[in-house]
Each structure stands twice: as C-alpha cells, then as structure tokens.
Amino acid sequence: MTTSRPSLTRLREEAADCRACHLWKDATQTVFGEGPAHAPVMLVGEQPGDKEDLAGKPFVGPAGQMFDRALKDAGIDRGKTYVTNAVKHFKFVPRGKIRLHQKPNTPEIKACRQWYERELATINPALVVAMGATAAQSVFGKITPINKNRGRLIDLDDGRKALVTVHPSYLLRLPDEDAKAHEYRRFVDDLRLAAAHLRHDKAA
Ligand code: URA
C-alpha cells in the first residue's frame, strides 16, 4: 500500500533541488516543512531565518522559541502539527558577519507556492494557520491584511478552514514590554481558536 509518508519524503527531496527563483543561490539549503504526514493543522510562517537556514528546520531560532511558547500556552502540541514556511529559502543581505533578513517579494512567494500547495495536498489538514503577511498571501493566493482578518476562522475554497494571525517575529520586534505582553496574549488567543477548532473537528 502506498502511504503519504513516502510522498512527503519525495516532496522534500524534490524541493531540495528547487531553482524556481534565485533565493537558492545564497541560502545554505531548502528548509522544508516538518511534522506528521497527516497532521490536522498546518502552521505557515514566512521564510527560514538565519538559524533555520543552518539547521534545515523551520522555526528553531528566536521566533521559533516564541512560537513554541505560544503553542504551549494555547494547548497545542507542536509535535502533532505540520510547520512550514511560505518561502523555503532564507533571503538575506550580508552585513559584516550578520545575515540580515529580507522580506520575500511577490514573485518569490509565487515561485515557492507550488511547495505549499503540494504540502497541503499531501498532509490534507482541516485547518491552515497563516502567521504574518507573507504566509497569508500564500495561503489565500492574494495579499490579505492581517488585522482585518485575524481572530476568526475563514472558509477556504477547498473546504478547509484558515486562521490568520501575526508572525511570532513581530512580537520579538515590539520595543515596549506592555505592548509585547498584550500582543503575545492576542497571538495565543488566535492559536486557542485553532485549538478549539481542532477539538471540535475531532469530536465531529
Ligand atoms: N521565521 C519564519 O517565518 N519561519 C521560520 O522558520 C523562522 C523564522
């Protein structure tokens, strides 16, 4: 019997040689998604950062620590989720010894969307969580403002639900501690909605 695990493995192998845009040239490697082959929820970030580029795994750096903490506070076990990025190569400009993150542009997001679509088809999650503007653009196939759309479940054309929220890096960048605490609570509240939907979906 063919299971989807080998096909996810094959997808990962194919993506390792992706040349659909120029970002592969400077990145260390393709950072593909990670998680169980039939995870009920797929969480989508923007692109790997410096640490992820080196490790070859999504959300293992500072944003990943924030993400892990928020998932835990929302009652979601990361090990039961599939975590990926809209863009699978690290885009940066070198500044001395540092590699400074650069936001991916629309052609780069579009070039990489095939991998998101193929991950989605393989994992077949009931719910997709888009974290930040780049992820939302990939998930909805168009520019989708975060604040106008966050905090509620949205129907996707393929029958799945989507949830839009901020990117965990946004929380790291907030200079004010009160704002940081407030925005963190909002982020966790959004993830709690995802957790509630998953419980509801499982019970149905
Ligand atoms: N930011 C992302 O969007 N994804 C990662 O994997 C790490 C940081």
Image (cartoon, rainbow, N blue to C red):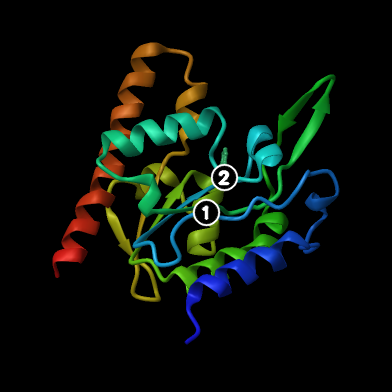
Helix, strand or loop status at disc 1: loop
Write down the quadrant of residue 48 in the picture. top right
- Find residue 44 and report its horizontal and vertical position in percent: 49, 51
Figure quadrant of the C terminus = bottom left
From the viewer's side, name the closer residue of 69 and 86. 69
Q: Earlier in the sequence, mark 1 or mark 2?
A: 1
Task: State whether label 1 is within 8 Å of ligand 1.
Answer: no
Q: Residue at x 66, y 40 (%)?
A: 55
From the viewer's side, name the closer residue of 190 and 29. 29
Q: Amino acid at mark 1?
A: Glu
State the count of labels: 2
Helix, strand or loop status at disc 2: loop
Q: Which residue is mark 2?
A: 58
- Find residue 111 and report its horizontal and vertical position in percent: 70, 63
From the viewer's side, name the closer residue of 94 and 35. 35
Q: Disc number at residue 200?
A: none
List the single residue furthest toward the left: 203
Residue 4 higher or lower than 40, as above or below: below
Q: Amino acid at mark 2?
A: Pro
* Left or right placement of residue 62 versus residue 191 in this view: right
Q: Residue at x 47, y 87 (%)?
A: 1
Q: Which residue is mark 1?
A: 34
